[in-house]
Amino acid sequence: MNTSNNYCGSLTTYQRYKSREVKIGTVGVGGENPIRLQSMTTTNTMDTDATVAQSIRMIEAGCELVRITAPGKKEAENLRNIKNELVKRGYNTPLVADIHFTPAAAEIAARIVEKVRVNPGNYADKKKFQEIEYTEESYQEELERIAKRFTPLVEICKQEGTAMRIGTNHGSLSDRILSRYGDTPMGMVESALEFLRICKSLNYHDVVISMKASNPQVMVQAYRLLINKMEAEGMNYPLHLGVTEAGEGEDGRIKSAVGIGTLLEDGLGDTVRVSLTEEPEFEIPVAKNLVDRYPNRLPHDAIKSIDTNPINPFDYHKRLTQEVLNIGGKNVPVVVADFRLKKKITPAGLFALGYNYSVPLDKWNIADVACDYVFAGDHVVNFAIPGTLGIIYNHKTWIKNKGERCYPLVDAKTYLSGVELSTELNMVHACLKDVTDGFIAKLKADTSSVLMIDTYNDHGMAEQRRLFMELINSECSTPVIMGRSYNHLNEEQLQLQASTDLGALLLDGLGDGVFISAKNCGSDQMIMQTSFGILQATRTRISKTEYISCPSCGRTLFDLQETTAKIRSKTSHLKGLKIGIMGCIVNGPGEMADADYGYVGTGVGKITLYKEKEVVQRNISSEEAVNALIELIKVNGDWVESVQDS
């Protein structure tokens, strides 16, 4: 296999990446240690009692590392009081100081807590969104300046036995990095490597690395590239995983699972933090649900190794497929709903799938989030279906019910046997073992079939990825709908597992549709919303407003949860719009570079509004800011009236 694209031990056999062990107090990270869970307090760091109380709630929820913001020297000093009070109450969980703009605060904190987190983008640089031309000489001078600023902290950490996280954020890359590498995963990696090389030169190795972004695709590519580049330089530092500014509720969980789960599937990650715009203790069970799938992943059914990996893991390229009706080609991925286990399919039953039949008007109302196909199995649909919907039957049932927009599902063996098929669309159910040379040859000569792939392997994502590699290397352009089955999960477990399994493939440009079959896992509506949520998080099909919302911390200057809910209630109908809601200036403008509009706390009760990267209105009263945001959206022509308003 091409080693230049290596980023994990194996693409077909599950194995943890072999990182070095770093001790954070008494807690080991990396090496043979389990994947650790962590979160961050949202209280004012100067409020010792509140921070201690919240830390205890986090610890009792399962948090193994507690991060606390220390934006200045007084907050760094107060970490001692917080630590002492926790110890007094019987809690010895390691504390992590979160530092951004103040090296002096980091140097104080490093003598108090077990770990210090620094952000390379703003530890030694002032971000002004300026493009600067550097010569090799001037760039080297900048690196020497950074080393001079950073070295004192490294020396203190060596003396005190304090660990460090070098935490790169996509939203806070320095102007210097942006000028040379652009707003790219490579820029994120190089930002961290500059600091890592300084640590290595000083023989300091108690370092953990993170590559966080609000876009899961950018985040995944950055971590993969980091592993690749570290190995080239003889480094194997442990990884802390997280999708920053993931948001709240099911959206935050799905987006986090897409990014974090994709990396966990390939054995990457030594600590995890799920960043939700919720109370921090609620993050821990979500993180636990994500990592609990992996201790028992082995043994799994063997997956044939791959000699040629046609997928570039560091750059997104959509697999090229032929178009079959509305599947494949340049179409967005379709969503297939599973209704085969229903007692009966009725018009009312389609309401959960986004189709609402109006009896007085005798017409269907179709929501933005409405499935494209329903797999009816052997149930016969005996009413007029909406014009945008297709029905899939088992082959024997289809033979007797060849109605308009009705299509057959056949297994691989039946497909090869030469049975009667539709001239428009045929779904062919197949697993990796079915993909033989003869099967591929028939698919390549067929312009009306779509693969509906499945897996029964405990390492199912890797098996389905292997199937895609077989198709690509054989130059077979048949579209593929990715199917996964789940049983007896709660709603959150289903969201996290499906987002991991399907999202990992979508981030690599694979798949022309998704099919979640879920027995005793929740409502039909929740399952369908999860399908669309996965497509939204991977940015392969946009069906609703996207909120880039930070999880809050002690720097936050307004009530993030309340404000996010208020903005969502007024803007959730603006399909395709991206709105950033940031508690402070630390990552705000940068992380919102991908957003259309930004709402950032810049002082107590003061909000600054952005249009993309540009400041539009400064220091608006928080009481007026939400209405001002709506007015800004209207002025720029991006507002539409909601159905309720009209």
Image (cartoon, rainbow, N blue to C red):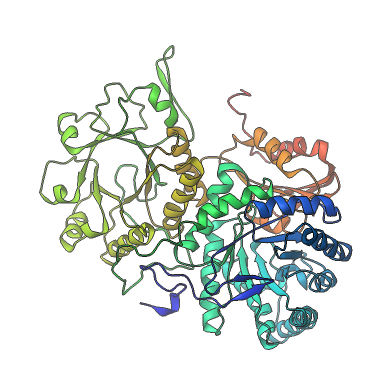
| Extreme residue toward the top, this view | 360
Does residue 16 appear in the picture of this structure? yes
Q: Nearer the viewer, residue 417 or 562?
A: 562
Q: Nearer the viewer, residue 240 or 355?
A: 240
- In the rendered structure, the answer to whether residue 269 lies left or right of residue 138 reads left
Q: Nearer the viewer, residue 618 or 245?
A: 245
Residue depicted at x 59% and y 64%: 271
Does residue 634 appear in the picture of this structure? no
Say if 547 sits above or below 132 in the image: above
| Extreme residue toward the right, this view | 74
Q: Position of residue 208 (x, y in %)?
A: 63, 72
Q: Quadrant of residue 143?
A: bottom right
- In the rendered structure, the answer to whether residue 222 lies left or right of residue 50 reads left
Q: In what quadrant of the picture does the N terminus appear?
A: bottom left
Q: In what quadrant of the picture does the C terminus appear?
A: top right
Q: How many marks?
A: 0
Q: Position of residue 39 (x, y in %)?
A: 66, 56
Residue depicted at x 60% and y 37%: 574
Q: Quadrant of residue 409?
A: top left
Q: Position of residue 167 (x, y in %)?
A: 67, 68
- In the rendered structure, the answer to whether residue 385 lies left or right of residue 282 reads left
Say if 579 sits above or below 477 in the image: above
Residue depicted at x 28% and y 54%: 478
Residue depicted at x 42% and y 52%: 502
Q: Position of residue 258 (x, y in %)?
A: 50, 54
